[in-house]
Amino acid sequence: MKKTFLSYLILMMVAFTLRAQGEGDPSLLTIDRIYASNEFKSDYQPPINWINGGNAYVIVEMNDQHIPQLVKYETASSKQSILLSADELTPRGANCD
């Protein structure tokens, strides 16, 4: 009886120790860390649309008022220009707020 109780006590101590180590160790990779947090969230890359035979591309970017606009980048020089502004993309009479 004493051996059974002692074995049970040792087993419980080991189980609690392992559990305590697993919960507090930030180096362990868990399902919750992967899917329930922003720790592994990747940055968003907007789609690139190539124009002028690959000499330039157009992407959608937000302006200072957080309204989308089309921005053209020259491939060789990385020169940036507004292809279509947010005002040009907004239908007349539409409210963007």
Image (cartoon, rainbow, N blue to C red):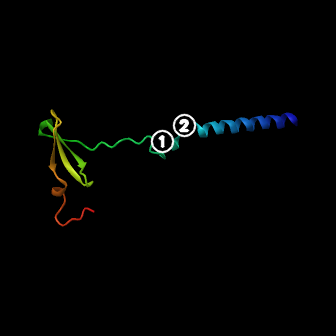
Q: Which type of secondary structure does the marked residue at label 1 adopt?
A: helix
Q: Residues within 10 Å of mark 2 (few under 14, many from 20)?
A: few
Front residue of 70/3: it is 70
In the drawing, does residue 79 fall left or right of residue 46? left
In the drawing, does residue 70 fall left or right of residue 14? left
Residue 76 is situated, as x and y percent measured from the top left of the image, at: 15, 32
- The quarter in which the N terminus is drawn is top right
Q: Eyeballing the image, is 66 above or below 19?
A: below
Name the residue tied to disc 1.
Answer: 34
Front residue of 72/34: it is 72
Residue 7 is situated, as x and y percent measured from the top left of the image, at: 80, 34
Name the residue tied to disc 2.
Answer: 26
Residue at position x 50%, y 42% in the image: 33
Front residue of 75/77: it is 77
Kindly report the distance in space between the C-alpha atoms of the residues bearing marks 1 and 2.
12 Å
Residue 81 is situated, as x and y percent measured from the top left of the image, at: 15, 44
At label 1, the amino acid type is: Ile
Residue at position x 30%, y 42% in the image: 45
Residue 9: name its quadrant.
top right
Residue at position x 45%, y 41% in the image: 39
In the drawing, does residue 47 fall left or right of residue 36? left
At label 2, the amino acid type is: Pro
